[in-house]
Image: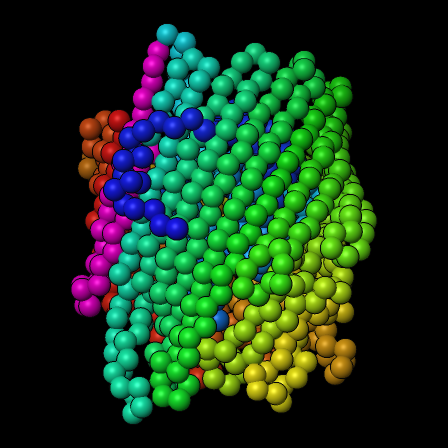
């Protein structure tokens, strides 16, 4: 399924009825945070980091994955030999443990639950809320590591006014040393009048990739992509009606992704490529009903469809082969919750959730199904004149037996505490139990990975005897405000996982190698984060350091092994200054990730990753027009330590030579 460029561009100027966010009021309010209750950002009980639209613009981010790179506690794993697509991790837990939402409604993931954040553009985003630590009580099994809520912009108009807004973004980038270019186009249109409002957002992100050729004695001249060729299309429409009794709305979303990249990137088989095509469609309704000043109800119901087609090719000598897989995933989710203000010191939330999932494809003998129900509740208690806040909660999950899967019942508690000994000091700590059902992929998929030599040639079998994963997560933080000049934060976490599901080699001597999803007895992740921020008139800066460790227990050797694809050290920094008179802003940003272990218990590492950029921007026409010039990869792929097989940063991640210049403009009407 493809979205044609002219069709998307035409849609930009059409106002389609769809959905807007529920329960959202002021810019300074956390709408759907870890508490799912409206709270001022500075008063939130949980550990929440907010990325504003201004910060997103300064970073030069085009997608949500770009924007999340500025958060120290999040690691965005770039496309590489080990990661065919970008993914994120939090607190040492991979992306299937992180819930991604748009206005409180979860975004459909791919086959194993990963949400491709590289497909979500930043157009029409008001802010991104990042909730660290286990949020399974409120958000379910895929929030053991944390939750990310993307809040879209809202436009309101008086009853006697018809208000139309249009925002256009166009940018083009080029690498001067190699003449490789890329193009990004996006637009947001909104129409509102009185109680009605609607919006439409569309974007096209195209990168032609960097083609190279190599010669093979048997296969001859082989073309491969040293950097990824991709086109990402996005379309989302929303509308809602607001009344004294609440509001009701609907939304629709469509994305299309087509990528081609060199997969192995090393050795004689540089012709090994991966073609990755996916499409997703979503649609749903959402709303809010206000019973009185103390009681209100929020709800949503959404249907999500995801299609994936992958083709892996090796075009070198006797190892030449081609293998493809097609899979489709359908999900229906409904959620209703009530908020009760019980006096001056209690905010009680309780709700119900239902989720139906089905999956089918080349690797399945029939369409597989799963069904889950949940009830959750929590109470926010404010004591000692608001200096002490306590947030207890609990969730009960029920998964009935479907296709012989067996019935599962699980209760998960949580408890969060906040103490403000003075206005400038905040202490927080929390405990949350996580719970994750095995995915349909992990239970039933047969994945034939026969497009790479050696250990890369294997068959991965699902296992319908898998037990659910459980975790116990502990978080603590201290935040200090020094006379509104700068803020300093220190936090730490520890997660203990039981029956963690992982791919395990059960026959290393066979060809292909045999692997199977199994429950690992136990695993732990732990780490600490140090953050600094300062805002002084025209000057702003942020910096962060994260230490993260993840280990899995191997009962056969009685050893704790480091887990793969996790950066132990991560540093982020950004600085911006608005020059007076010329009113031009300059923003510098950078990140560094230490080397990652490629596989659990192994001894092969990736290179470290270092990237720095600068953005120069100027607004005109009463801030309706903004022009910017951005430079990326300023250090020309500098990295300090190569991978175990000699790969540097450029080779392993398929990056361009030299820096990249991007010229762009944004127009608001």
Task: Decide which of 416, 306 is in the foreground and name it.
Answer: 306
> Can you give x and y, in whole percent of width and height, for residue 182 in the image?
25, 56
Residue 549 visible in the snapshot: no
> Can you give x and y, in whole percent of width and height, for residue 445 in the image?
61, 65
Question: Within the magenta stretch, is there residue 167?
Answer: yes
Task: Decide which of 332, 103 is in the foreground and name it.
Answer: 332
Q: Residue furthest top?
A: 160
Q: Quadrant of residue 446?
A: bottom right
Left or right of residue 591, residue 616 in this image: left
How many numbered discs, if any?
A: 0
The residue that appears at 55% across and 52% down in the rendered structure is 329
- Image quarter where the C terminus lies is top left
Q: Quadrant of residue 366?
A: bottom right
Task: Decide which of 332, 133 is in the foreground and name it.
Answer: 332
Left or right of residue 260, residue 288 in this image: right
Judge whether 278 appears above or below 382 on screen. below
Left or right of residue 633, residue 500 in this image: right
Question: Within the magenta stretch, is there residue 536?
Answer: no
Tell me where the magenta segment starts and ends, as one range.
161-188
Task: Decide which of 342, 527 is in the foreground and name it.
Answer: 342
What secondary structure characterizes most of the magenta part? strand
Judge whether 635 appears above or below 6 on screen. below
Q: Residue furthest bottom?
A: 217
The residue that appears at 34% across and 39% down in the rendered structure is 202
The residue that appears at 47% across and 57% down in the rendered structure is 308
> Can you give x and y, in whole percent of width and height, for residue 326 in the image?
49, 61
């Amino acid at each position: 399924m493809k979205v044609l460029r002219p069709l998307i561009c035409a849609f930009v100027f059409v106002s389609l009825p769809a959905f807007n966010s529920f329960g959202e009021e002021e810019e300074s309010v956390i709408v759907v945070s870890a508490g799912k209750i409206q709270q001022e950002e500075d008063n939130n009980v949980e550990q929440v980091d907010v990325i504003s639209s201004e910060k997103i613009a300064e970073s030069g981010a085009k997608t949500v994955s770009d924007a999340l790179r500025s958060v120290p506690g999040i690691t965005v794993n770039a496309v590489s030999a080990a990661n065919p697509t970008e993914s994120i991790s939090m607190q040492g837990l991979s992306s299937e443990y992180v819930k991604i939402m748009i206005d409180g409604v979860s975004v459909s993931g791919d086959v194993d639950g990963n949400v491709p954040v590289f497909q979500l553009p930043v157009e029409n985003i008001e802010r991104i809320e990042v909730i660290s630590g286990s949020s399974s009580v409120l958000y379910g099994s895929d929030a053991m590591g944390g939750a990310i809520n993307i809040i879209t912009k809202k436009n309101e108009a008086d009853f006697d006014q018809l208000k139309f807004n249009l925002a256009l973004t166009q940018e083009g980038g080029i690498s001067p040393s190699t003449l490789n270019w890329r193009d990004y186009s996006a637009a947001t249109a909104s129409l509102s009048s009185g109680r009605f409002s609607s919006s439409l957002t569309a974007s096209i992100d195209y990168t032609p990739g960097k083609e190279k050729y190599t010669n093979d004695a048997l296969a001859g001249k082989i073309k491969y992509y040293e950097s990824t060729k991709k086109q990402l299309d996005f379309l989302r429409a929303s509308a809602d009606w607001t009344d004294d009794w609440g509001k009701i709305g609907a939304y629709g979303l469509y994305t299309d992704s087509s990528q081609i990249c060199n997969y192995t990137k090393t050795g004689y088989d540089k012709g090994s490529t991966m073609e990755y095509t996916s499409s997703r469609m979503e649609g749903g309704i959402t709303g809010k009903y206000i019973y009185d000043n103390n009681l209100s109800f929020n709800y949503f119901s959404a249907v999500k469809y995801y299609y994936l087609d992958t083709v892996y090719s090796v075009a070198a000598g006797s190892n030449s082969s081609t293998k493809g897989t097609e899979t489709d995933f359908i999900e229906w989710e409904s959620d209703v919750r009530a908020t009760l203000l019980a006096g001056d010191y209690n905010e009680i939330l309780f709700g119900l959730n239902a989720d139906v999932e089905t999956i089918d494809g080349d690797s399945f003998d029939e369409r597989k199904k799963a069904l889950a129900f949940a009830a959750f509740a929590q109470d926010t208690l404010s004591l000692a004149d608001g200096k002490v806040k306590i947030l207890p909660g609990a969730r009960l999950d029920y998964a009935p037996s479907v296709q012989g899967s067996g019935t599962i019942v699980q209760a998960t508690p949580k408890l969060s505490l906040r103490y403000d000994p003075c206005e400038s000091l905040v202490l927080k700590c929390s405990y949350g139990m996580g719970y994750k059902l095995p995915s349909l992929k992990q239970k039933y998929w047969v994945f034939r990975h026969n497009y790479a030599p050696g250990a890369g040639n294997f068959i991965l079998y699902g296992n319908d005897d898998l037990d659910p994963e459980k975790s116990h997560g502990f978080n603590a933080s201290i935040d200090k405000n020094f006379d509104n000049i700068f803020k300093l934060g220190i936090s730490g976490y520890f997660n203990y996982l039981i029956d963690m599901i992982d791919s395990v080699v059960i026959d290393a001597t066979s060809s292909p190698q045999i692997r199977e999803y199994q429950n690992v007895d136990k695993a732990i992740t732990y780490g600490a984060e140090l953050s600094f921020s300062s805002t002084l008139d025209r000057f702003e800066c942020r910096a962060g350091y994260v230490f993260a460790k993840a280990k899995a227990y191997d009962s056969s050797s009685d050893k704790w092994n480091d887990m793969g694809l996790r950066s132990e050290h991560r540093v982020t920094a950004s600085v911006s200054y608005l020059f007076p008179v010329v009113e031009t802003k300059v923003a510098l940003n950078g990140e560094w990730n230490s080397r990652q272990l490629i596989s659990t218990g192994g001894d092969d590492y990736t290179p470290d990753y270092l990237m720095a950029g600068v953005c120069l921007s100027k607004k005109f026409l009463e801030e309706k027009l903004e022009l910017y010039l951005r430079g990326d990869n300023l250090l020309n792929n500098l990295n300090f330590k190569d991978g175990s097989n000699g790969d540097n940063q450029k080779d392993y991640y398929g990056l361009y030579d030299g820096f990249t210049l991007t010229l762009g403009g944004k127009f608001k009407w």
